[in-house]
Image (spheres, rainbow, N blue to C red):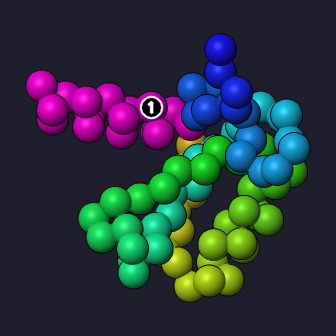
């Protein structure tokens, strides 16, 4: 039994939001995520809020479509094979 939603559920990452995600927000904290990134999903209502949240902290941030996210994940899985 899963206690929390994960990215596979394609639901917005904003607290208490149950809306379907429409994009992915890729970000990292360069002080601790050397060579890694975090991915948040966002619905249209929370997209700008989440981008502003990480941008305000000066973290690098990129917004991509869910289709592009799926393509990138497929490419990364292929690299491990």
Question: Is residue 71 covered in magenta?
Answer: yes
Q: In this view, does 49 lie to the left or right of 42?
A: right
Q: Which residue is drawn at 46% across and 67% down?
A: 28
Q: How many labels does the image show?
A: 1
Location of residue 7 (image quadrant): top right
Which residue does the image show at 52% across and 78% down from the upper left? 59
**Of residues 41 and 32, the one drawn nearer to the viewer in this rendering:** 32
Q: State whether residue 56 is above or below residue 79.
A: below
Highlighted magenta segment, given as a residue range: 66-81
| Residue at screen point 86% across, 42% down | 17
Secondary structure mostly taken by the magenta-highlighted segment of the chain: helix
> Within 10 Å of the Cα at label 1, are there few (<14), some (14-19), or many (20+) other Cα atoms?
few
Residue 8 location, quadrant = top right
Instruction: Using residue 54 as the reference point, say whether residue 80 is left or right of it.
Output: left
Identify the image quadrant of the N terminus: top right
Residue 16's spot in the image, x, y percent? 87, 44
Q: Give the labeled residue for mark 1.
A: 70
**The C terminus lies in quadrant:** top left
Left or right: residue 27 compared with residue 5: left
49 is higher (above) or lower (below) than 63: below
- Given residues 15 and 27, the one toward you in this image is 15
- Judged left or right of residue 31, residue 58 is right
Give the percent coordinates (x, y) of residue 2: 65, 21
Most extreme residue toward the top, as rendered? 1
Percent position of residue 4, x then y: 70, 32
Label 1, secondary structure: give it: helix
Question: Is residue 13 on the magenta stretch?
Answer: no
In front of the other: 76 or 33: 33
- Asked which quadrant contains residue 5, the reply is top right
Q: In the rendering, at what x and y percent does residue 47 appear?
A: 75, 56
């Amino acid at each position: 039994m899963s206690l929390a939603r994960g990215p596979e559920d394609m639901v917005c990452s904003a607290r208490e939001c149950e809306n379907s995600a429409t994009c992915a927000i890729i970000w990292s904290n360069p002080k601790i995520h050397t060579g890694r990134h975090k991915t948040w999903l966002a619905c249209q209502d929370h997209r700008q809020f989440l981008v502003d949240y990480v941008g305000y902290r000066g973290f690098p941030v990129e917004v991509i479509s869910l289709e592009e996210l799926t393509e990138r994940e497929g490419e990364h899985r292929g690299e491990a094979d």
